[in-house]
Image: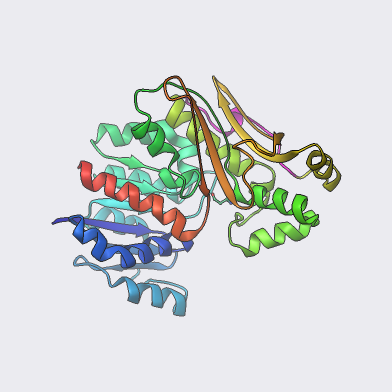
Amino acid sequence: MKTIKISIIGFGAVGQGVARSLLSKQEYLKKQGYDIRVVGISDSKGSEINTKGIDLEDALNRKKQKGTVAIDTSDALELIRNVKHDIVVEVTPTNIGNGEPGLGNIRAALHAGRHVVTSNKGPLALRFTELKEAAEDNGLHLRYEATVGGAVPIFNLVHEALAGNSIIGIEGILNGTCNYILTRMEEERMPYELVLKEAQELGIAETDPTYDVEGIDSAIKLVIIANSIFGQNATYGDVDVTGITKITPEALELANKNNYVVKLVCEVRESRLTVAPRLVPKRHPLAVGGTLNVASILTDLAGRITISGKGAGSIETASSILSDILYIARNS
Ligand code: HSE
């Protein structure tokens, strides 16, 4: 049995999803030969640390009742630096301004010799090359499947299953909130403000939903794809971005009459990065509805491969995080 000690930094929807998944998968993972122990959890008010392994049920209950997991005042950086463990699971909220606190947490983890698994888009969109090099220089893994497409394994697919292919281009729908809004506006003829409110209630919209509807969240994800898959050194400013705020119900109706749907499509082709609403034929693989995400990858050997699935959600995002943890467990 291989014991892997991890910390969970950030205990919001994603962090709690990771804890719940580890609880429900404990026996399954042990049968596969892995004892994954959480030795530290940290949120904005403090931490719980137990080098023998935290009782996750207890931690989840405390978070629910008291609003925090903290039972001691150590902050995330102290936990990352001072508690001996293998993997830092960095799942604090995305901040695209300066990437903090995620950027500092990831830097500290790599500096302390710990592998990193993250769902945090900010640090990767802002400092991809720096972080990747820091991981490589220290012989560590930096895994970020959960940053783009939630449960949809885009990076694993390209880097593992499609290894050997040259990737010619990728187009996709990478923001569930926009896709939900456009779908509901078209199918139910609902007004924009009302559907946006629904998306917020579903818990998929960003804290500031401008990030979703102005195309910013999509653009950040596209930057991570461009850097990870196309070896670029892109940042947000390199993306040509148009959001969905100017799409009228009349435009959606007209598209519908002509057998098209309007989608917020992200595309990387050569060095061009674009996020913009586009007309997509109703039977096209990109014409997925509701909160779904989709990525269509054009390769030289395999042709076009398209995958679709849930782009947000606490357990769905935890699926990608768990896969990254197991990748490191197998390969370190
Ligand atoms: N707000 C994002 C979305 C969440 O709607 O897709 C997942 O990154």
Number of disc labels? 0
Residue 60 vs residue 273: left or right?
A: left
Point out residue 110 in the picture as x, y percentages from the top left corner.
30, 43
Point out residue 317 in the picture as x, y percentages from the top left corner.
45, 54
Task: Identify the residue at horizontal 66%, vertical 48% (top origin).
Answer: 178
Please state, as top left, top right, bottom left or bottom right, where the C terminus lies in the image: top left
Q: Is residue 112 visible?
A: no
As rendered, which of 124 and 261 lies closer to the eye? 261
Q: Quadrant of residue 260?
A: top right
Q: Quadrant of residue 288?
A: top right
Please state, as top left, top right, bottom left or bottom right, where the N terminus lies in the image: bottom left
**Magenta residue span:** 232-244
Q: Residue furthest bottom?
A: 65
Q: Is residue 135 visible?
A: yes
Task: Identify the residue at horizontal 45%, vertical 80% (top origin).
Answer: 65
Point out residue 329 in the picture as x, y percentages from the top left corner.
23, 48
Above or below, 307 against 201 in this view is above
* Residue 236 magenta-highlighted: yes
As rendered, which of 76 and 171 lies closer to the eye? 171
Above or below, 298 against 34 in this view is above
Task: Identify the residue at horizontal 68%, vertical 49% (top origin).
Answer: 210
Task: Identify the residue at horizontal 64%, vertical 54% (top origin).
Answer: 208
As rendered, which of 17 and 169 lies closer to the eye? 169
Above or below, 181 against 13 in this view is above
Q: Residue furthest right?
A: 250
